[in-house]
Image (spheres, rainbow, N blue to C red):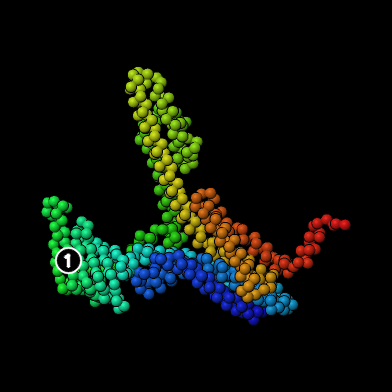
Amino acid sequence: MKKIYAFSIRSYLGPLVLTFFIALFILLMQFLWKYIDDLVGKGLEGTVIAQLLFFASATFVPMALPLAILLSSLMTFGNLGEHYELVAMKAAGISVWKIMRPLVILSVAISMLAFLFSNYVQPYANLKFQSLLYDVRQQKLAFDITEGVFYHGIENYVIRVGKKDKDGRTIYDVKIYDHTDRQGNIKVTTAQSGYMEMSSDQQYIIFTLFDGYSYTDIVSERNYRENRPFDRTEFKRQRIRFDLSEFSMNRTKEDLFKSHYTMLNIKQLNKSVDSLDQRLNERKDRFKLSFERRFQHFATLDTSLKSMLIAKVSDNKIDTNSIEKEEIQDTTMLKLQWPLIQNFDRTEKSSILDMAITAARSAWDNVIFNKNDFSFQQENIRKHQIAWHKKFTLSIACLILFFIGAPMGAIIRKGGLGLPVVIAVLFFVVYHITSITGEKAAKVGDLNVVTGVWLSSLILFPVGLFLTFKATTDAALLDVDSWRKLMKKLLPHRN
């Protein structure tokens, strides 16, 4: 029996490692295609790109690992069935469940490691990846002047080179516009030729120009726009140095990203959710206490309307279609009209009513602002709760997809990368779509957080149980004859 267990594990580990790295590579290529414009042409060092790809790969593990387990388990048992090894084991009295037993234990171990990865490694990888990606995207393009094109990469300067030699450093027909005075093109330097070279510390680029002129418009004199006075200086050789420090990548402090919910572990998420709940409750209490004090004219309003407004805003259930601005305005005007307003003349009545309408509109704007603020805070809390549950979904998904892939492979009895890949992709698409749909619905509050996050597991878990039962009982799930017999029993006989 131990040899059978060792054989099963060896047959499973090879496809698992292979499919995992293939899936990771495909996801990494997708990342490169998405951000290729942010990476090319910026003169990034190889170590920076390697770090970015490494941390990006770590963030793709929650997608690559379940797919690898599903595909490898399906391929393993499909190969065993296709080569009649599964039949030989059954003939020797070894059930499918016993064959699966060592792989189940291995899958449980992988699920535990997946939880540790989600809770400790992934937040750190997300922090490193997001901060590094932010710095890379903010990085300016590397210094590169194109022939006949005005180059604006250096701050306060515009450079145009008419022609460049093949060596990349000798230049001709050079024009340099100096905008450091913030007064337009009042300083221009032209030269027939020159060459570019980097300083020894790579912080400056030095232009050595030959046979040129420097023009400076004199804008300090009166009527200079009409007379256009300027100074012209001729030179045989001139050196101009440009600072390239802005082209070097500056690393942002990682503390700016640490508070994001994707970069927190379970303990930190619990603390953040408690703090956000407390902050939201305090915010609601402040709104209830300040509403009447801030809008004293509401003291004359109907108590039922006022209580309804405060309650609905605090619970984030206000519906702008059910309580319109005109409803508040009409109620305010009604209270003011009788009987006090009768003591004023027509002009004063109009002014009083205008003031009441303005106050009502201000109150309405305050209600809408607080409603949107409460909605934003509640959505932020839900995002933290979703991140908390996702620490466990990866582990459970690995187990469920194993119990789908292994029995399905034993049923179809096809190995390799043909039919198993098609079936695995179909199941994984269902898993991924339901996961994304549930999470989005939970974020906006359309679904309970627990239901939304665990929706894919709730759907696929019965499927895994059904397939495992069919495989361990040798049920002919895909046998055409058995399905034909079943249809004959269900359908009435025809003459």
Q: Out of 429 and 92, give the one closest to the viewer.
A: 429
291 relative to 115 in the view: left or right? left
Looking at the image, which residue sits at the far left? 221
Q: Which residue is pictured at 29% across the width and 64% down the height? A: 150
In the picture of the structure, the residue carrying the numbered disc 1 is 214
Q: Secondary structure at mark 1?
A: strand
The N terminus - image quarter? bottom right
Residue 65 on image: x %, y %: 54, 69
49 relative to 175 in the view: left or right? right
The C terminus - image quarter? bottom right
Residue 92 on image: x %, y %: 73, 78
Q: Which residue is pictured at 69% across the width and 70% down the height? A: 411
Residue 215 falls in image quadrant: bottom left
Residue 458 on image: x %, y %: 60, 58
Q: Is residue 460 visible?
A: yes
Is residue 315 positioned above or below 111 on the image? above
Q: Which residue is pictured at 64% across the width and 64% down the height? A: 464
